[in-house]
Amino acid sequence: MRLTKPFPALLFSLAFWVLGFSAARGQVHTRTIYARPTAVFSFDPVTNRPTAASVQALAAYADRWRTELGPGNITVVCLTRPEELGIGWHIYHTLADSMLLQHAMAEVGAVSPLPAVLSAEMAGGLPLDSVRGEQILVADSYRIGSEVASQRKFDKLYMTSRDFLPELAAEAFKVRAFFAQPIATLARSLSTRGCYFGPSAFSTLFHTFQRQATGAQLSLFAPPQFDATLDSGAVRIADVLRLFTHENALVTVRLTGAELDGFLEQIYGMSYFTIAGTQSDLVRTRVPYFLHDDLAGARYRVDLSQRSGRRVTIYYVGDGAFSEKTAYTLALSSFRAADLKRKYPHLVVRMVEPDYRLALIRWLMARGPESPLNPVAPDNYSLAPERWVSVIAARERRAIFE
């Protein structure tokens, strides 16, 4: 623990009373606990693993001091808003039970961070914005008659086995059941490994989602993890959240054919080596997986025997011939849209879904587990020369992944 500022001189003058004679002299010790927990219960609903920064741990901390100082001398201020919880809790709050956080706070005896509650302490310079995760800020006040001393310090929440009242223990069971329920079914296993060597069934699933959710003609997608698999059978909410771990929105961009071609040249120039035969290297593995995009909705060829900037030839978009002057609508993540904006600053990015993962979960739930999804690798583009690439790809699959 560390103090945010040295003890006031007055506090030292009161130390004698704190150490043994406070009760006799009528000292009143009050404590305000400020916390920004990232979970409701002491487990991560996505991984089902223990977590320390929870409302449940805050309850144990507050109860310990209520026992020592008396219930009326403890104030708990929960600084967390629902959208600041971990992704699992945010999804549960949005899709299942928007009142769970409020229920948990009520059991802890916490007050909401209303300006009226915070104003007095904020005037004392408490750095409330710096309180994150397991860290809590404790403000103590010591009063003897008309004399008052204060102390501020940081402490931490720790994992606890303490249970809430039975009705909240039942809520914890509901949370676990919610993330374990099937929301969709896959007819086949899907792996990100195929994404680096041409069209893949894995990418097809998410291209379909992006185009249907936005109505865009084209979709740009890169693997959300370097090496991940969605097994055949039931798909659960936890599976989606473990796969997509980064915050992103689903957006669209209106761009010309020439701009699209230029961005694809950038992608394929960066992701692949120039090849001169079957002994060449193919995939630039030092380029992060999330920059290995491919495009759906168009037919094109990438000639890796050509130098960077002269590799991509687009033939069709949808059912029509490709034109550099025609404007097309492209669906992609907000992360990749930021890179596109850096290349073409004049482009306007339109947000369709503020939370990519939440939109994907809703899209899967709408299809339900009764109708299996069966994405297949399309033939809309190829890495060329095809005979060279097929030989190199077989070798590099083993070298990279096995």
Image: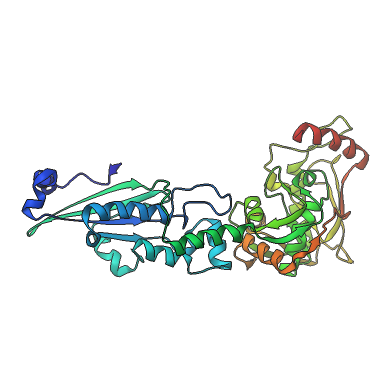
The image position of residue 68, as x and y in percent, is: 23, 52
The residue closer to the viewer here, 99 or 379, is: 99
Quarter of the figure with the N terminus: top left
Who's the residue at 29% across and 69% down the image? 116
Q: Nearer the viewer, residue 201 or 294?
A: 201
Q: Is residue 79 left or right of residue 362?
A: left
Residue at 74% of width from left, 42% of height from top?
271
The answer to whether 251 is drawn above or below residue 267 in the figure is below
At a point 50% along the width and 47% down the height, the residue shown is 50
Q: How is the image coloured?
A: rainbow
- The reply to whether residue 125 is in sight is no
Total count of labels? 0
- Among the 4 quarters of the image, the one containing residue 280: top right
Going 56% across and 57% down the picture, which residue do you hit? 88
Q: Position of residue 380 (x, y in %)?
A: 87, 55
Q: Residue furthest front?
A: 166
Residue 69 position within the rendered picture, expressed as x and y whole percent measured from the top left: 21, 54
Q: Is residue 264 visible?
A: yes
